[in-house]
């Protein structure tokens, strides 16, 4: 009987040790929960951006560190995104990366996430302070909040400089004035505001006279871009010399409208975009688009992930991280 009891005790100890060993090995793997809120999946640039976020997190995983990514589509609806952020907080995310639907709602999102004690990395859409610069109080007053993006002033300036580099500086008909159409992304979005302002400012700062024929809101959408430019061409015809688009999606729509109107980019009209989507880079090479500006989704997404990982490791974050744009015209390809 004693032998049986002794054997039973040994068996219990062996099973207990095995269980402890199993638990220990699982505890050696740390899994971080990362919530990623994207303003809208139906956006060419943000599709590339969000895919690269997921891909890059995977490359950073090790035998002991894993990242569980939960990514959600805000569907361009601020109410929807606010609910998604609330859900992330309830799920106790370790870090949140957020591409705001509306920058005017930044304070609400920041306050929620900060109150929950979760580090927040804002991306792509920069909230601005009352003074109209990057010093947004909700960011600079929080050591667990930062913004990762590119300075949209630079992208607008580059659009204008591409036009200035042309032999005629955009003045196709030689009347001394560059007459243009402006297709705006979202008038509330600082990126759209700066691209709209600084593309033209680059021309006027260089002493070029300009005339705005049409400025209309395309909300980053290709179909709307086509509709705006088609209507402008129907109204103003050959008077239009340059079409500025705040992004490549709308520029693709504009290109379709230009072709349908029997106009030829590089000969009797110029077309500018921003993002340097692969399709648009090919068009620049072929001459069917005058130029675009590389909005570096790889550089931005990798920086956002690197900063999120720093926060997860308890390292301090800066409030702002900037990634340069790159000018893409015919000379870019050598």
Image (tube, rainbow, N blue to C red):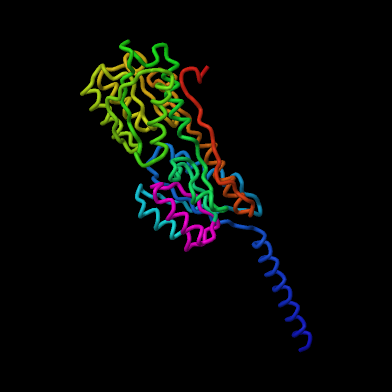
Q: Could you tell me if residue 58 is visible in this image?
A: no
Res 9 → quadrant: bottom right
* Whether residue 185 is situated above or below residue 109 in the rendered picture: above
Q: Residue at x 35, y 47 (%)?
A: 76
Q: Residue furthest front?
A: 131
Of 196 and 232, nearer the camera is: 196
Q: Position of residue 153 (x, y in %)?
A: 46, 32
* Whether residue 301 is situated above or below residue 10 in the rendered picture: above
Q: Which residues, given as a range, are shown in magenta?
A: 89-118
Q: Is residue 183 left or right of residue 149?
A: left
Answer whether residue 103 is magenta in the image.
yes
Q: Residue furthest bottom?
A: 1
Of 68 and 109, nearer the camera is: 109
Q: Position of residue 200 (x, y in %)?
A: 38, 25
Q: Residue at x 53, y 16 (%)?
A: 334
* Whether residue 242 is situated above or below residue 127 in the rendered picture: above
Of 82 and 201, nearer the camera is: 201
Q: Position of residue 69 (x, y in %)?
A: 51, 52
Q: Could you tell me if residue 264 is visible in this image?
A: yes
Of 85 and 205, nearer the camera is: 205
Q: Is residue 9 left or right of residue 105?
A: right
Res 15 → quadrant: bottom right
Q: Position of residue 238 (x, y in %)?
A: 26, 16
Q: Residue at x 24, y 23 (%)?
A: 233
Q: Residue at x 76, y 89 (%)?
A: 1
* Whether residue 12 is situated above or below residue 101 in the rendered picture: below
């Amino acid at each position: 009987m004693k032998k049986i009891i002794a054997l039973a005790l040994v068996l219990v100890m062996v099973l207990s040790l095995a269980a402890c060993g199993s638990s220990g090995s699982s505890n050696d793997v740390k899994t971080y929960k990362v919530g990623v809120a994207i303003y809208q999946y139906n956006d060419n640039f943000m599709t590339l951006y969000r895919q690269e976020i997921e891909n890059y997190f995977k490359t950073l995983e090790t035998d002991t560190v894993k990242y569980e990514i939960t990514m959600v589509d805000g569907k361009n609806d601020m109410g929807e995104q606010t609910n998604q952020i609330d859900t992330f907080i309830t799920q106790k995310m370790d870090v949140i990366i957020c591409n705001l639907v509306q920058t005017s709602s930044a304070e609400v999102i920041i306050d929620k996430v900060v109150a929950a004690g979760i580090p927040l990395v804002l991306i792509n859409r920069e909230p601005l302070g009352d003074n109209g610069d990057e010093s947004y109080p909700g960011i600079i007053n929080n050591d667990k909040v930062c913004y990762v993006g590119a300075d949209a002033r630079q992208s607008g300036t580059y659009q204008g400089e591409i036009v200035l580099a042309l032999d005629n500086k955009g003045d196709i008909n030689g009347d001394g004035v560059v007459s243009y159409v402006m297709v705006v992304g979202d008038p509330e979005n600082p990126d759209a505001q700066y691209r709209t302002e600084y593309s033209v400012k680059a021309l006027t700062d260089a002493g070029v006279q300009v005339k705005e024929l049409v400025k209309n809101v395309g909300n980053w959408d290709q179909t709307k871009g086509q509709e705006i430019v088609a209507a402008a061409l129907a109204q103003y015809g050959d008077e239009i010399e340059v079409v500025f688009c705040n992004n490549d999606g709308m520029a693709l729509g504009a290109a379709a409208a230009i072709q349908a109107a029997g106009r030829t980019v590089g000969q009797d009209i110029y077309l500018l975009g921003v993002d340097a989507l692969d399709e648009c880079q090919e068009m620049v090479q072929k001459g069917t688009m005058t130029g675009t500006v590389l909005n570096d989704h790889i550089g931005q997404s990798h920086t956002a992930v690197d900063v999120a990982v720093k926060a997860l490791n308890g390292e301090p974050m800066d409030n702002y991280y900037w990634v340069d744009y790159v000018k893409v015209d015919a000379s870019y390809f050598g």
